[in-house]
Image: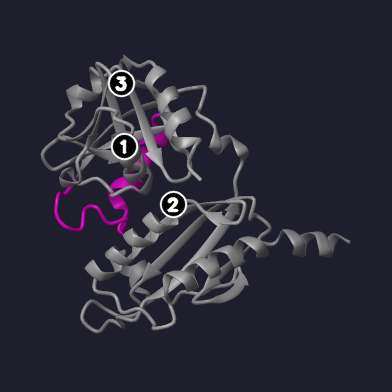
Amino acid sequence: MAFLFYFACMNHINFNGKILNADEPVLLASNRGYRYGDGLFETMKVIQGKIQLASFHFERLFSGISLLDFLIPKLVSQKKLEQDILHLCEVNKCTALARVRLSIFRGNGGLYDEDKMAQYVIESWPLSESVNKLNENGLVIDIYPDAKKSCDKFSNVKSANFLPYSLAANYAKKNKLNDCLVLNTSGAIADATIANIFIVKDGIVFTPGLDQGCINGVMRRQLISAMQEAGEQIKEGVVSVNDVLEADEIFLSNAINGIRWVRQCGNSVYGNVKAIGIHNRFIQTIS
């Protein structure tokens, strides 16, 4: 019985279309994703056997694949990847509510002798129902001072080259923060470690534009579109550090949590009236 329980709870991954035990080695030391961060990834939310905002995720994924000049095996299509994702969730018994990471990387080799043919890994884990609710205890965040994101055509890609965000997350952990904001090379706000940022001032919602170096977030895109259709005032552009510190409200967005209310950044404290309304109108209603 103990063996059967262990087997039932064992996590699995999908590597290039094959289901393997999660603890089985799959990457070579020459893997370019490992060596150079030469890859990209999508973090998706599955609810009742359906990938939430799937069209946005795969549009961003294949746009990034084209930009990074990957070669994709002919059989690897959006339909194939969706099938692999949902099958893995079934194997890992988390189709009701799951977090999925799809990682795609160029292959193996050095800088000038690479294998351009892409490979992929899919991972999935069960999620708590709490991710579907707006956090009652607001996040405490700050600004990470030691890295600046560039603003070029690669800045919006959800890249495996994650060093600025990784260091910002370490800074947050050391300083007992929930998250950190990352600056761009102009000293303006780009985004947070695993989320886009929105601020509210005098009833208007602002978020850094894509030209500010932020990740082209799927939930960011969904929120902007839904709020514009509803006639809400939302603007994309430059968000300065002072804008953040003087805001009435702040919330962060990503595909897993929808939005999360920020209670404090530095010495500034924020409310959440607008965040509650946005969550109820535009997050809970996503199908």
* Residue that appears at 54% across and 64% down: 85
Residue 193 point in image, percent of width and height: 35, 42
* Residue that appears at 50% across and 22% down: 137
Residue assigned mark 1: 229
Q: Earlier in the sequence, mark 2 or mark 3?
A: 2
Q: Which mark is residue 266?
A: 3
Instruction: Determine if the magenta segment contains residue 24.
Output: no
| Amino acid under disc 2 | Leu
**Element under disc 1:** helix
- Identify the magenta region: 149-175
Q: Are marks 1 and 3 in contact (CB under 8 Å)?
A: no
Residue 237 point in image, percent of width and height: 16, 36
Q: What colour scheme governs how the chains and residues are painted in the rendered image of this protein?
A: one colour
State the quadrant of the N terminus.
bottom right
| Amino acid under disc 3 | Gly
**Element under disc 2:** loop
Q: Are marks 2 and 3 in contact (CB under 8 Å)?
A: no
Which of the 4 quarters of the picture holds residue 152?
A: bottom left
